[in-house]
Image (spheres, rainbow, N blue to C red):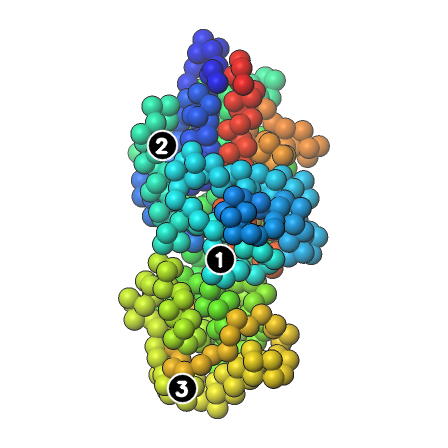
Amino acid sequence: MTGPDPTETEGPDLVVAGAGGGLAGALRAAEHGLSVLVVEASEHFRRGNNTSMSTAMFPGAGSRWQADAGIDDGPERFVGDIMAKTHGTADPRLAGTLAEISAPLVEWLADSAGLPLSLVTDFNYPGHTVPRCHTIPGRHGSGVIDHLARRAGEHPGIELLAPARLTDVRLDDDGAVRAVVVRYPDGAEEEIPTRAVLLATNGFGADRGLVAEHLPEIAGALYQGGEHSLGDALRIGRKLGAASGFLDAYQGHGAVGAKSGTLVGWATIIHGGILVDLDGRRFGDETRGYSEYAAELAARRGATGWIVIDETIHRQCLPFRDFQDNVDAGAVVWGADATELAEVTGLPAAALAAEVADSTAAARGERPDRFGRTNWERPLTGRLAAVRVVPALFHTQGGLLVDQRAAVVDADDRPIPGLYAAGGAAAGISGRGAAGYLPGNGLLPAFGLAWLAADDVARRYSHTQ
């Protein structure tokens, strides 16, 4: 593909604000022959943005890895899972678009971007009816960012500007993007001409005022996301007349280690673990999803609880770097049985023993679980372990409304020429609140919309395709 005539515009063909999923958009655009400037607010983005903090799970419905594993999946089934999890509140257009490109996206990430992806088959996340999440060794987003940042740094068509913050987007008389304003740490500002901007600055999770306004149920919880997720895209887009929506949607998590400050992970639950509060009691069907469990845990006494597992589950979770970090931090405590575990955790012994016994009976099929849980991989057996967890807000899922090409739209669903949004900067596919979040619903819009935006910029501003 031939890039646009350099005499037609000065500056880069595309400015990407945010070096998370935005790096995928930058690489895709450069692949099309476009010049790209990535503007990133943090010089430590490889460890400080939401992508780097993720478990690196990329849904791909109908991927070649699924085909090799004999798994029957496709976009229609994926959309069905999204709509079921969100109770029909997700944006159907965007859900369909992202489901359709999910498999081509993960295959591009492997083949062109070079990520060593494989299908996760050792367990299935809540809401996905078949295994469709793909990840890298270590199952941690820092490996994704390290790899993509290195690829972008090696590409002659991509320039990274960090630390610098994109503060404004300026339109021409026809309402199309003509320039961006970048602010440097010393307060100096620069106007950079361009015809296309991808806002990939995540959401507003770091702005406590906006969180309190839109997400009051989780406002008091730990924030476990990037410090620069301050709602920049929302502010810039609204100023330009962009529509926004789903601002009450977010990804929470009910399993951040209280001692380590890092994610314990819901694989502990899916493999058969249980979550109890400070009274030693379970308070719901844990397999419904880790996102909604954040607010539910936040509402319990002390806003904390304990995940109880056994030696088999402990061993199954060690491939997750986050879980290993908790082990290394001494956050996992052990007991020969429920009574001894109660002694080391400070939980009421009788209550904890009763919960372990009840859940074990339910897992064996001896009686129904009183909370309706049916997903029991196996009953807890032998020596038991526990780790204390606290609820957290990871990232917001509402933002600027976009169309099927990732173009930001106004209240009449008309694209603002040259303006795109991806990830938390855009309204996602999680519907309302926290309960609609499916694992991968953060990275799929982050990488998928950035990918689509790059393709559309190339289509709009290149002579040939």
Q: Position of residue 74 (x, y in %)?
A: 62, 46
Residue 86 appears at what percent x and percent y? 65, 55
Image point (59%, 65%), residue name: 288
Helix, strand or loop at label 3? It is loop
How far apart in space, not on screen, are marks 2 and 3 (Cα)?
Answer: 51 Å
Q: Residue 331 shows which numbered tag? A: none
Q: Which residue is at the front of the view, 405 or 303?
A: 405
Mark 3 or 1: the one toward you: 1
Who's the residue at 61% across and 40% down the image?
A: 100
Q: Is residue 371 left or right of residue 359?
A: right
Amino acid residing under circle 2:
Ala
Residue, disc 2: 152
- Cβ atoms under marks 2 and 3 closer than 8 Å: no
Assess whether mark 1 and mark 2 are in contact (beta carbons under 8 angstroms): no
Check disc 1 and give the amino acid type. Thr
Establish if 137 lies above or below 462: below
Labels 3 and 1 touching (C-beta < 8 A) = no
201 or 462, which is in the foreground?
462
Mark 3 belongs to which amino acid?
Asp
> Closer to the N terminus: mark 3 or mark 1?
1
Q: Say which residue label 1 marks.
A: 121
Q: In the picture shown, does residue 246 fall above or below 360?
A: above
Could you tell me which secondary element the residue under label 2 belongs to?
helix
Give the quadrant of the C terminus.
top right
| Mark 2 or 1, nearer chain start | 1
Residue 220 visible in the current orientation: no
Near-viewer residue (150 or 38): 150
The residue under label 3 is 337
Please state which of residues 119 and 344 is positioned toward the viewer in this rendering.
119
Sequence-earlier tag: 2 or 3: 2
Q: Residue at x 52, y 86 (%)?
A: 357
